[in-house]
Amino acid sequence: MAAQRLPVRKTYKLYIGGKFPRSESGRSYEVFGQDRKKEFLANAAQGSRKDVRDAVKAARSAVSGWAGATAYNRGQVLYRVGEVLEGRREQFISEVAASEGLTRPLATRVVDAAIDRWVWYAGWSDKLAQVLGNLNPVAGPYFDISAPEPTGVVGVLAPQASSLLGLVSVIAPAIVSGNTVVVLTSEDRPLPAISFSEVLATSDVPAGVVNIITGRTAELAPWLASHRDVNAIDLAGAADAADVSWGELEASGADSVKRVVRPAGDGADAIEPDWSVTPDLHRVRAFLETKTVWHPKGR
Amino acid sequence: MSKFEYAPAPESRAVVDIASSYGLFIGGEFVEPAEGGSFKTLNPATEESLADVSQAGAADVDRAVRAARRAYQRVWGPMSGTERGKYIFRIARIMQERAREFAVLETLDNGKPIKESRDVDIPIAAAHFFYHAGWADKLEYAGFTPAGSAAPKPLGVVGQIIPWNFPLLMLAWKIAPALATGNTVVLKPAETTPLTALLFAQVCQQADLPPGVVNIVTGAGETGRALVEHPDVDKIAFTGSTGVGKGIARSIAGTRKRLSLELGGKAANIVFDDAAMDQAVEGIVNGIFFNQGQVCCAGSRLLVQESVADDVVRRLKRRLQALRVGDPLDKNTDVGAINSAAQLARITELAEVGVAEGATRWSPECTLPKNGFWFAPTVFTGVSQSHRIAQEEIFGPVLSVLTFRTPQEAVAKANNTPYGLSAGIWTEKGSRILWMADQLRAGVVWANTFNRFDPTSPFGGYKESGYGREGGRHGLEAYLRLDSAPSTARSTRTGGSH
């Protein structure tokens, strides 16, 4: 009988501008499984302020291409992501099971829901302008039309508990309309996000559209929330993040008039919602601007 | 060329009764403020005092919020959309009936020409109520909730703070959608222009609007702060300076209060060499001198294609010599008074900075009245992008002229500002209009026109010009409770999603 084969492990790195760098800080941190054994899973890159700034720069330079692509093209690229996700379904089931401490059947349901969620959002790309736009019947001889446009660069604090379904539920609504994102992953469960970045890298998603940083949420989030070249921020992942005050993050975005999606919950309390609930367009609308164009009519 | 002289054509102010003093409008009646303070509101064209207006303190704001909460819970919240809508229709009709009174009062308190208050501010304000009245029982069709679901719910008590440049129109932009969606309101008008809001309170009384649905608290920044910080306010809607707007966003951060902001602007009005020049010149003039340039979406940066720059500036100067600056109540006046001494000081200072930084200043010959706050229409040429007059919102009748060569350069210069409220395009080439409109990062783009407003047309900014829209179907969103269900169901820390 042959000796048991030693598996080849993966080095989990950041995803910035379509590349997979280590943190410029040279730091990493240990990631453990969430089951009873708490076994060591991997060393994740511990991203730094500089990594956040590099990611914002990459996201900004990707805006014009991604926002300027046709909605049909964006829809096809995002659907392609769904196809590649499906192809890696087994891998994600194992990773989600380990990362979240789920049984295999439960992890299977989560991964299936994540793939279906992604495909649901992908199909919105070329419907948003029709569903959210209007011809406005102004009282005068003018053609007047309102249509949505992406806000620009969106900072995303990905959910702390739901490492894949939660992750895609905050990335997809931001990028489907043409925004680009800088994502801070779940601090303790970052590995599925990095595997997801490999899916993005092999799915024709242009470099810089999605940038993914692992590390300490409390260390990185303030830099993202206060960055003047970030137009909006989703604070979903402030819920249950160690030493993170979503109110302070929101306040630090005020100086650049950031659009803010607050975490779910009441009052100062922030909770992570049940991501298996079917979404509506709330998160898509949060990262859209409405542009209204007027032109006179005449002979 | 001989000059046509106009005979004076003053609008009569007899149509308006201004009381010597005004209380606060809380719970359906005028009440004295708890602390008893007051301030004067002036006619900026003469510096004559028009009335003493109550200074609302924190206790008064609290009283108003409680009145609004009571009305929300007992009357306005439970009322059917159809009944709510009928009240709002009533308000629209009474405003139309009393339009002349409103127009004269607005001009007296604000300083804007009567032809603008009469033909723009008041009719569009009434139209806003008329438009939104019809929404009150149709909110389930507004597209914010999935098909087949019930009408979306209001937020509750809304605090609204409005500026002095379009006092009644901004009131309408704020109150009409709030009421249509089922909210109750505490509104603070600007301290220099409270009178039409107080006349609007009388309209609410005439319409038999239930007490507490609309409350009006007059005062300055402290009153606004008390409203923003009041714990029982569910939403703040603010129109005003970017600086104050950022402060409000900071103040409500970490609460569950909603916020919509309509802030400053530094709009580019872009003229290509193939534009219909006479129309473009009219559009430039309307863009920056309408309401003395005290307009957040004013076309304060003229970007003109280099090949026609000299011609455009020459035509512009000739046109400006025909503008009539003076008595706002005169029906022939084109440019009225600056709203306050403080605003005049800011405009004066920035114009001096423009000269100091090397731009060339020009104004048409015009005699300004001795009393009151006046600033002659002013054009700066030789302006570069780094000049403060090309960067900062002046909020006055001051135009900065810059040039460009290619459409790409026009877009780059137009977008080179932290603001993103509006923009103008003048060209006869349709494909270029549509391409430009796509490229400009601004919430409202006027092509071959400028400064058009309509209740059905969403208005609001990109970037540091704010967020949220006012008007149209889109404007309803800022007053509806739309955060979807997940906040109630919590996923477990160990179980992930299930």
Image (spheres, rainbow, N blue to C red):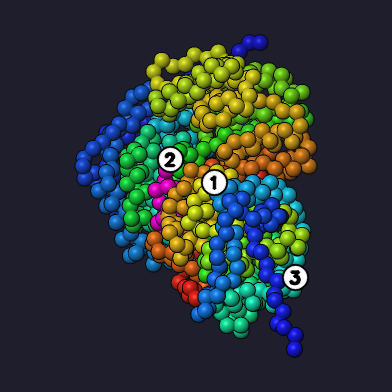
- Residue found at x 40% / y 26%: B342
Residue labelled with disc 2: B244
Q: Disc 3 residue type?
A: Glu
- Quadrant (top left, top right, bottom left, bottom right) of the N terminus of chain A: bottom right
Choose between B289 and A120: the one closer to the eye.
Answer: A120
Q: Secondary structure at mark 2?
A: helix
Give percent across and percent down for residue B410.
Answer: 70, 33
Sequence-wise first label, 3 or 1: 3
Disc 1, disc 2: CB below 8 Å?
no
Q: Disc 2 residue type?
A: Val
Residue labelled with disc 1: A227
Inter-mark Cα distance, 3 to 1: 34 Å
Q: On the same chain: label 2 and label 3?
A: no
Q: Is residue A195 magenta?
A: no
- Residue found at x 58% / y 25%: B387
- Answer with left or right where residue B210 lies relative to residue B100: left
Mark seen at residue A83: 3
State which region is magenta: B247-258
Inter-mark Cα distance, 1 to 2: 20 Å
Inter-mark Cα distance, 2 to 3: 48 Å
Q: Is residue B378 visible?
A: yes
- Residue found at x 59% / y 36%: B417
Vertical placement of residue B475 versus B397, above or below: below
Vertical placement of residue B289 versus A3, above or below: above
Disc 2, disc 3: CB below 8 Å?
no
Vertical placement of residue A248 versus A161, above or below: above
Give percent across and percent down for residue B491.
Answer: 49, 74
Q: Secondary structure at mark 3?
A: helix
Choose between A294 and B418: the one closer to the eye.
Answer: B418
